[in-house]
Image (cartoon, helix red, strand yellow):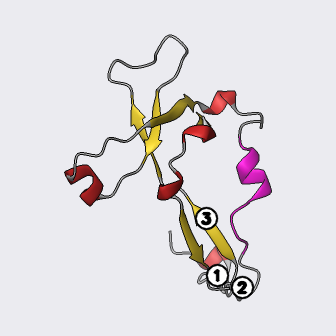
Amino acid sequence: MSFTISIDVTKIDKSLLKSVTKKDGTKATYLNLICWPNRDGQDKFGNDGSVKHSLTKEQRDAGIKSQILGNYKVKQEQDSVFPPGFAEKINPAPAFKNRAPKPQQDDPFGDIAEDEIPF
């Protein structure tokens, strides 16, 4: 399952952008968002919910309302541009090449001749 999200970037509250310095010294700017499902399911445009600014607990307690920036749609696997199983083909389970092979078990009855079997 995946989502498509469409937001109006002109509505972004710039004061909610968070600039950080990453461990490698590069700078990044983040915007925390929240996806909120529609009460009555899909709207007439096929949107499953809205996208809003994510507010801190203090902002919510102060009565600040989050502005709707856009919408999202839930996409099912059949909507994927990739064929079923594509992810498994490009990212297969790891092979354990460095693992020692299992020792071959000797046949516990291999040294008994067929005519010596008592039944």
Between tags 1 and 3, which lies in front?
A: 3
Magenta stretch: includes residue 88: yes
Q: Which residue is mark 1?
A: 107
> Distance from label 1 to label 3 (Cα)?
65 Å
- Report whether 22 appears left or right of 72: right
Q: Which residue is mark 3?
A: 29
x and y percent of residue 38 in the render? 38, 25
Q: Amino acid at mark 2?
A: Pro
* Vertical arrangement, residue 82 with respect to residue 102, above or below: above
Does any portion of residue 11 appear in the rendered image? yes
* Vertical arrangement, residue 45 with respect to residue 86, above or below: above
Classed neighbour count for the residue bearing mark 1: other residues with Cα under 10 Å, few (<14), some (14–19), many (≥20): few
Classed neighbour count for the residue bearing mark 2: other residues with Cα under 10 Å, few (<14), some (14–19), many (≥20): few
Mark with earlier residue (2, 1): 2
User: Disc 3 on helix, strand or loop?
Assistant: strand
Q: Which residues are magenta?
A: 85-95
Q: Amino acid at mark 1?
A: Asp
